[in-house]
Amino acid sequence: MSDLSAPWTPPAGAFWDGAWRSPSEGFPVIDPEDGTEVGQVGDCSPTDVDAAVRAVADAALQGEAWPVWRRRETLHEAARLLAARRELFVRLLSREACKPVRHAEAEVRRALETVRLSAEQADRLEGRTLPFGDTPRGANRIGWFTREPVGVVAAITPFNDPLNLVAHKVAPALIAGNGVVLKPSEQTPLTALAFLEVLLDAGVPADRLAVVPSRGVQAGAALVSHPLVDMVSFTGGWTSGNAVARAAGAKKTLMELGGLGTVLVLGDAHLHQAAAAIVDGAFGNTGQNCLSVQRVFVARERAAELLDLVVRGTRELVVGSKADPATDIGPLVDEPAAERVEAWVSEAVSAGATVQIGAKRDGSYYWPTVLTDVPAGSRVLTEEVFGPVVSIEPVDTLEVAVDEVNGSDYGLQAGVFTRDIDAALDLARRLRVGAVMINDTGDFRIDAMPFGGGKRSGVGREGVPYAVDAMTEPKIVAIHTVT
Ligand code: NAD
């Protein structure tokens, strides 16, 4: 067992204008495993948010004061400090969030890559010359564009990857020369504040950063609608994303929203490989992942065999304390989340679904659950469960599966298992999602790839190089020569 007892106490509950701040109100951060208090953070008001945005806006306009070479060095130093504080972050992620220590360690490794990759994007901040000679109207002109920071980026993050998803917004924004005001998830603000400390210790100019935790939505709403915020980078659920987009109005937005992870298993697939990947993709982080595998369509003649393998793999998962390195399945983020998952499964079962394994709750824990015979229209098939539940459905033709994916409200990533390259590429062409993984589930990404989807899954693409593109704008300089 790891000792998670004393994770970290921030110097104060929030940070802006170069200093730690103590908003008049605070709120506790709770460990979902045992209900104990992990720490206290500030409950920032709209007035606090206004002060934070104004301070960052002043700094973000002083581009030359923090040149690109220094940004790159600073982010490399931040990666070094993050590695040195790995233990602290594992403890924090395991206490305030829902990650068993093994998964917390994996997230710290991912975040390190994200910060290093961001440092390396300094090379991407380049423009090019413009083809004025391509039109008679451009005669006697030369010119170019450079890539300029957008200004103030408002970053809003969810609870399920409290370090790496924060890093995915803050590090690209900084290398691009922006200032950032971060509103982390109210369920996981301590990790965000500890990451802020890493950035400050690494040498990021303190006035370029602000972190404004808040218990309710008022700080986030004030942030995204602030007139000095130039761009909103949001990761969270579709309902919140919709509210954020409305509040932001006509601003640049990057929206990473939910998913309905679907896997297609064709008749010729390697079933052991598919089943292992499905178990991992459905139950990693207890299903609290936008890429979680939620629906599996399998060729009818292989369905019984696949189901058997998935159920056997699920039975081997260890449900337990987050502190135990043997634990695969920790708690959901809180008890209401586990009650919601339980209610959705009960609703499907009342309508005729069969529980193959799982469907048991104890407090904030929900056991990994495999369902079959789930009636069409059940919420476990049509809405993002964000919990450890997967449904397996035999199909007679691929068309059924393609129609289900393309007809759903989401379009993030999908997986296809087959040994037939023609069938795989045909499906890759036809599935309306942001990524098709062949012989993997959709629960796979590297941090350097363009990441995102369409429909209710989001707007635009994150992934470090693409976030840097999104967080910059071209600026043209043209010279009219006198001959
Ligand atoms: P959530 O939508 O409840 O909250 C996300 C963040 O938005 C939090 O910081 C929250 O305080 C804030 N927020 C909520 N309503 C707001 C409003 N009206 N104005 C301003 N801020 C507001 O999401 P969650 O429960 O923390 O995370 C789970 C969701 O995040 C899932 O839907 C999951 O799919 C999604 N997610 C998507 C990705 C991706 O990259 N596509 C990655 C991780 C999680």
Image (cartoon, rainbow, N blue to C red):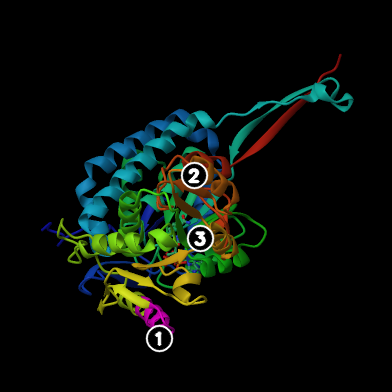
In front: label 3 or label 2: 3
Crowding at mark 2 (Cα within 10 Å: few <14, some 14-19, many 20+): many
In front: label 3 or label 1: 1
Q: Relative to 82, is 320 above or below?
A: below
Crowding at mark 3 (Cα within 10 Å: few <14, some 14-19, many 20+): many
Quarter location, residue 229: bottom right
Where does the C terminus fall, quadrant-wise?
Answer: top right
Magenta stretch prevailing secondary structure: helix
- Point 36% across, 77% down: residue: 354
Measured Cα–Cα span from mark 1 to mark 2: 48 Å
Compare residues 452 and 189 and report the one nearer the observer.
452
Q: Is mark 3 within 8 Å of ligand 1?
A: yes
Disc ID at residue 173: 2
Q: Relative to 382, is 227 above or below?
A: above
Instruction: Judge left or right: residue 37 versus residue 235.
Output: left
Q: Which residues lie in the magenta part?
A: 340-353
Q: Amino acid at mark 1?
A: Ser
- Point 20% across, 61% down: residue: 316
Residue 288's spot in the image, x, y percent? 36, 63
Instruction: Judge left or right: residue 125 versus residue 419.
Output: right
Q: Relative to 68, is 442 above or below?
A: below
Residue 203's spot in the image, x, y percent? 36, 38
**Of callouts 1 and 2, the N-terminal one:** 2
Measured Cα–Cα span from mark 3 to mark 1: 30 Å
Q: What is the secondary structure assignment of the residue under circle 3?
A: loop
Crowding at mark 1 (Cα within 10 Å: few <14, some 14-19, many 20+): few
Q: Which residue is mark 3?
A: 257
**Of callouts 3 and 1, the N-terminal one:** 3
Q: Amino acid at mark 2?
A: Ala
Q: What is the secondary structure assignment of the residue under circle 1?
A: helix
